[in-house]
Image: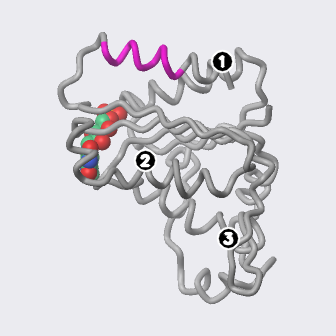
Amino acid sequence: MKVLLLFSHPVESSFGAAVHETARAALVAAGHDVDDCDLYAEGFDPVLSRRDRLTYHSHPENMELVADHCRRLDKAEALVIVTPIWNFGYPAILKGYFDRVWLPGVSFDLVEGKVQSRLHHIRKVVACFTYGSTAMLAFLSGNPPKKIVKRVIRAQINPRGSCRFLPLYDMNRNSQEIRARYLKTVAGAMAAL
Ligand SMILES: Cc1cc2nc3c(=O)[nH]c(=O)nc-3n(C[C@H](O)[C@H](O)[C@H](O)COP(=O)(O)O)c2cc1C
């Protein structure tokens, strides 16, 4: 499968980087064609500018500044997202990726004001999210990142596709053993993709 691996973490020695490398290596070992998109390493500009907003609905003009990312998304048959959760959402660089790349004419069309997905070529999604909070605190907060994956992204991919949410909570307290077990879960999910 052609897998777009989206990763956002600024620190090479972080646990997030270990999750990213585990996912990447397991995908390659399973024979997948991996497009490893490390947003920080690539210096992705997440700011939706005045120009971006003015051309937002004008396809293909809207994709001129992010054409390569649009092509990469268009090729993907599976999407794997590896990220820490900040302020119960995506880090700005990842949020900006979705704002600037998942555009009208790219990830969806507006037909008589209604959204029609253009992402049915994506059949699998795996979201590997790490949280500082416990699962209970995330639940009590409404867990917006989980809803974005299970409701928003799920609704955009192929209706027969699958969407796995793989969270690791309590990052401020969990042991090396728990972290190692999570990395195994991630590797297993990539092998089963
Ligand atoms: C700016 C910032 C905001 C954060 N906000 C949240 C949050 O709202 N909810 C949460 O569960 N954890 C939050 N965290 C904790 C991160 O999710 C946690 O540090 C990360 O998952 C740990 O992974 P890492 O060691 O690879 O960075 C935040 C961390 C940072 C740096």
Dot 2 or dot 3: first in sequence order is: 3
Residue 22 is left or right of residue 74, and the answer is left
| Crowding near the residue tagged with mark 1, few <14, some 14–19, many ≥20 C-alpha atoms within 10 Å | some
Residue 48 vs 113, above or below: the answer is above
Inspect the image, locate mark 1, and give the three-letter code of the amino acid beneath it.
Ala
Which residues are the magenta region? 178-186
The three-letter amino acid code for the residue at tag 2 is Lys
Residue furthest to the top in view is 177
Colour scheme in the image?
Answer: one colour
Q: CA distance from mark 2 to mark 3?
A: 22 Å
Q: Quadrant of the C terminus?
A: top right
Q: Looking at the picture, which amino acid does disc 3 mark?
A: Leu
Q: What residue sits right under mark 1 in the picture? A: 191
Task: Evaluate if marks 1 and 2 touch, with contact meaning CB atoms under 8 Å apart.
Answer: no
Mark found first going from the N terminus, 1 or 2: 2
Q: What is the crowding at mark 3: few (fewer than 14 residues within 10 Å), some, or many (at least 20)?
A: many
Q: Read off the residue under disc 3.
A: 103
Please tell me which residue is depicted at 72% across the width and 32% down the height of the picture. Answer: 34
Provide the secondary structure element on which disc 3 rests. loop
As measured in the structure, the alpha-carbon distance from the residue carrying label 1 to the one carrying label 3 is 30 Å
Q: Earlier in the sequence, mark 1 or mark 3?
A: 3
**Residue shown at 57%/25% (left/top)?**
23
Give the class, few, some or many, for how many residues have Cα within 10 Å of label 2's Cα (few <14, many ≥20): some
Q: Quadrant of ligand 1?
A: top left
Q: Which mark is residue 11?
A: none
| Relative horizontal placement of residue 53, taking residue 147 as reference (left or right) | right
